Image (tube, helix red, strand yellow):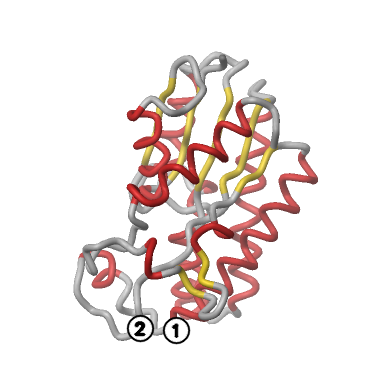
Amino acid sequence: MADLLALGDSHLDALKFAADLGVLKVNRYSFSIVPGATAVGLRNPNSQTDAVNIFKAALADQPKDSCVIIHLGEVDCGFVIWWRAKEYGENVDAQFRESIRAYKLFLVEILEMGFSRLCIAGASLPTIRDQVDFGDVANKRADVKVALSVRTELTLSYNRELKALADELGIGYFDVTDAVLDRSSRLVHDFYRNPDPSDHHLDRKKTVSVWAAMCNAFVSGQS
């Protein structure tokens, strides 16, 4: 079995939960989770979260034959892309492309480090409902008034771009979206929402099996 290194934002905690439960088919595992990390911030070594430097430090300590999973994009699609478009007077598509471009450059850098078993995990879907203004994350994102349905559609588009990027680079891709998306509302199904309405993460107890199955397919060479 291979070693696993997973890099990403706080939504990666569901996969860490699976690892801690012992249901991942890996030898050893390590997680580098940076709350608030963004894909677009990967191009900035002086970003507020310092994510790119933290991730690079984790990669430096990892054997090159390890499986590496990277999970980012929820903060981009749920807040940063919209905020930057407003702040800099640009359209949303331009900021969308900037985020994807920064993601790609970091993936290429990981490949150039010698890691060939690399996989993107699609961005987590947004859950903060319209007009919700309580909870730490909702408060921080209050400046962006974009409907949940619109944020969700942007995330779905973002993940399609990430899948195309994975195909282009010849790396793995998986995405829990199909499991958690309500086909009628086109939003996260209520079943998978966090029981704490102020918590924007999915319920990890209900998504852990989905994450585990998809991760295990990747590390075993099936995805």
Query: Which disc is residue 147 wearing?
Result: 1
State which quadrant residue 105 falls in.
top right
Q: Are the residues at dot 1 and dot 2 in contact (C-beta closer than 8 Å)?
A: yes
Mark 1 or mark 2: name the one nearer the start of the chain: 2
Residue 108 location, quadrant: top right
Q: Is residue 222 left or right of residue 193?
A: right
Residue found 56% across the figure and 46% down from its top: 121
Q: Give the number of marks.
A: 2
User: In what element is the residue under mark 2?
Assistant: loop
Position in image of residue 207 (x %, y %): 42, 50
- Up-down relation of residue 39 to residue 75 (above or below): above
Q: Quadrant of the C terminus?
A: top right
Q: Amino acid at mark 1?
A: Ala
Q: Which residue is mark 2?
A: 130
> Which residue is rendered at x = 53% and y = 81% of the image?
89
In the image, residue 40 above or below residue 108: below
Q: Residue at x 46, y 17 (%)?
A: 61
Dot 1 falls on a residue whose secondary structure is: loop
165 vs 26, nearest the viewer:
26
* 129 horizontally vs 111: left or right: left
